[in-house]
Amino acid sequence: MGTVGLSFGSATSGQGFDVTTTVTQILANEQQIETPWKTQLAALKAQDTAFTTIGSDLATLTTSLQALTDFSGVVAEKQGSSSNTNVLTLTGASQTAVAGSHTVVVNTLAQTSSNYSDTIANAADVLSGSLTIQVGSGAASTITVGSSSSTLASLVTAINSAGIGVTATVISDASGARLSLVSGTGGAAGQLTISSALSDATTGINLGFSTGQTGLNGSLTVDGIQLSTASNTVSNAIPGVTFQLLAADPGSPIQVQVTNANSVVETAVSSFVSAYNAVVKDITTQEGKDSSGNAEPLFGNSSLSMIQSQLTSALLGGAASGSVRSITQLGISLNNDGTLTLDSNALDTALNSHYGDVAGFLQNANSFGANFASTLNGLGTQAPFGNVYLSLQQNAAEEKVLNDSITSEDARIAKDKTSLTAELNAANQILQSIPGQLNEINQIYSAITGYNTTATG
């Protein structure tokens, strides 16, 4: 610690000294006690930044892996095509769908039964009577017009609220309004039977009902097998595949092609490899020195070594799935610098040859995917046991102690500054008053002795 001396100059000059500068010099020595604390605090903050970057990249790696391990993720996707999308279009293909080609012939479309009432010129007319509705072979239900269902609109509400398997609406045009009833069950099984005792009490006209569309099953063949469907959305003809019938065209067989979503899976695996390499590069950077030759903030940190070790072990872990036993069979190789490289052609071959085994290797219990996901859960910023989380928590505790010490020392220094300033100001005032006091003494001496102290020889 340095020393501070007060330089007053000539004690009789009356100039005194610079109090502010003197106080600053004295306190500067006191503030040196904070220097190692602030240095340590800066080092911890630098570690926090490095840990946060690693934690963020581990989170990205976790997300990229989830796309592969999620049972409804990219591995579950299949791709399909129709040779005539005007007649048949594919709407979905699940993981259970088997890649292959199928021949479909659409003979007739399914129809949903519907009925409509006679036209009422004024939709606000008061109705009376009742309406009996039967869906297929189900029990008939009677809706009686009452005070709360006396118009077409309120009758619609009453029918829809009854839950009898039909949807009622009011259809209006230039001629008036009609009550429309559509079966909630497609095909022949949903055929509506309507018995009307309704009348327009305002005009006295009875309301009859006409068939809008007869409930019919659709007819198609899949790979030569004759099938009947109550809906034009067909989901049980080809396992795992859902398609929509749009038009009947019995003379034109349609080719439906189901393929594995290789390109989607390959993109996801590539994202995983890139995310893994980002974490490895974070670790490699922290194991070296910066451009000035100084060690990186986490150089030699045990948490860093643990993350690296567990990630490497996770690459080799997980139970086999059929013919797939390691990531090398997915075209993933481990380089000397710890990064990964993906051979897309090798992955494509694995997907084409053993798609189910690849899926199992990523998603089965104790699989590579499950094992790697478990490892990541213990490494990142997840509370309460993530490695990065615990490291940041430990740093935060040390930073609090240092900040508290600095705050306490700053408070002491501030108190010393106030005290020193007051004391030195008082001393300075005394120094500045000395010439005046000497002058007063000279005057008293002259008065007593008659000696003129200002006279010259």
Image (cartoon, grey):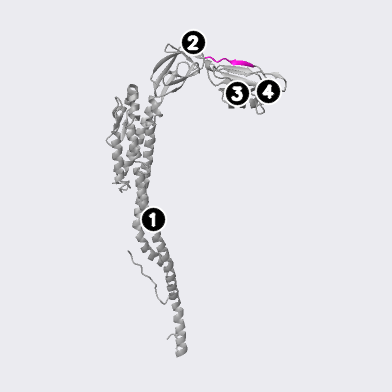
Q: Earlier in the sequence, mark 2 or mark 4?
A: 4
Q: Amino acid at mark 1?
A: Asn
> Is there CB contact under 8 Å for labels 4 and 1?
no
Q: Quadrant of the C terminus?
A: bottom left
Residue behind mark 1: 403
Q: Earlier in the sequence, mark 2 or mark 3?
A: 3
Is 213 magenta? The answer is: yes
Q: Amino acid at mark 3?
A: Ala
Residue in front for this viewpoint, 153 or 260: 153
Circle 3 residues within 10 Å: few <14, some 14–19, many ≥20: many
> Is there CB contact under 8 Å for labels 1 and 3?
no
Foreground disc of the pair 1, 3? 3
Residue behind mark 4: 128
| Up-down relation of residue 437 to residue 231 (above or below) | below
Distance of label 2 from label 4 (alpha carbons): 48 Å
Circle 4 residues within 10 Å: few <14, some 14–19, many ≥20: many
State the SS at label 3.
Answer: strand
